[in-house]
Amino acid sequence: MENILDYSIEELKIWLVNNGEKGFRSSQIFDWIYKEVYDFDNMKNLSSNAKELLKNNFYFSIPEVVRKIESKDGGTIKFLFKYSDGNIIESVVMKYKHGNSICVSTQIGCRMGCNFCASTIGGMVRNLTQGEILGQILRASSEIKERISNIVMMGSGEPLDNFENVFKFIELVNSSQGLNIGQRHITLSTCGIVPKIIDLADKNMQITLAISLHAPNDELRKTMMPISNKYKICDIIESCKYYIEKTNRRITFEYALVKDVNDSDKHAEELGELLKGMLCHVNLIPVNEIRENSLKKSSSENIKRFSNILLKKGIETTIRREMGADINAACGQLRRSYIEDNNIYKGV
Ligand code: SAH
């Protein structure tokens, strides 16, 4: 059995023809899926033969809602989703004036090991397929009863560690017969897997690339992000310049400010020098404190100071609003507490 959401409309057409059915049924099936009909028996214009054939070969992997938590202001909704194999992931919907954004997970868990992040604590369980990532959006938008128009891949997982599936996912959501979400409305965030950044640049897409930098030099970055032992900052910057050259897109650098670790004036100066002259934008994030470590967030005065140093060097800088902090919206924390409370993956 296969997840029908893993198929593009063209792939399903070929499959149908190879299995003795009419190719045009593929469009009919996709129309039903995007009308939230996830059951072949209810796809009224399909013949009974087609329904049988599909039922014998496909299922819908749309995760079920285990928990749904809304922030007090209603602007952030966090979902804890469960796939049919019992695995749990998180997605977060953020409502903005310009439309709804969803933060999706690309893997169950993560193997990157960043020391401030809750998603990586139990390691990686498995990759999510393109259809499973898409399923998060379908379920979330049917729950909020509104269209979702922006996607950020900043849930659990490292998207470039699941490149093939993530690339197919972008194609699926971008398709005019699918969700029709423009590439410029899609952000991929990575800890900096250099060869994959180059592969992504070669795909010539218009998505926004966000780099989780978090430190201005390798020595410090190595203490926070094990991936730094493999790829140096200068190589990440080189690959970003290549991305800009290919796509003409502005890169976002994410920098989570941790008190007394990476938030001094000297760090800001160093970061400024590193990024000077580049088509980029720095997003400063007060680190979300998690109970598994003792890292503390920088004070707001400190964050402001850090930001001013960058601005003075001509680097566009914003400070991220802490949306949904009251509901543990950040980075795998809800999944962690669910796993602990329910004793899943015991011993991990
Ligand atoms: N693996 C990808 C995407 C997932 S993490 C990446 O590394 O970019 C999404 C973003 O949240 C990354 O910038 C990550 O570094 C950041 N993040 C993780 N834990 C955090 C925390 N406790 N506080 C603030 N940001 C965090």
Image (cartoon, rainbow, N blue to C red):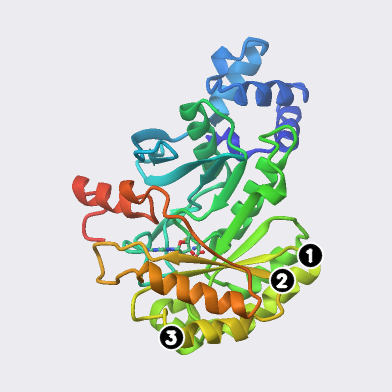
**Front: mark 1 or 2:** 2
Q: Relative to 188, say whether 52 is above or below.
A: above
**Front: mark 3 or 2:** 2
The C terminus lies in which quarter of the figure? Answer: bottom left
For disc 3, the marked residue is 220
- Residue at 21 percent across and 60 percent down: it is 347
Q: What secondary structure is found at the residue carrying circle 3?
A: helix
Q: What secondary structure is found at the residue carrying circle 2?
A: loop
For disc 1, the marked residue is 248
For disc 2, the marked residue is 279
- Residue at 46 percent across and 75 percent down: it is 305
User: Residues at badges 3 and 2 in contact (C-beta under 8 Å)?
Assistant: no
Sequence-first tag of 3 and 2: 3
Give the Cα separation between the discs numbered 3 and 2. Answer: 24 Å
Nearer to us in this view, 199 or 125: 199
Asked where in the image residue 3 lies, by quadrant, the reply is top right
Question: From this viewpoint, is residue 61 visible?
Answer: no
Give the amino acid at mark 1.
Answer: Asn
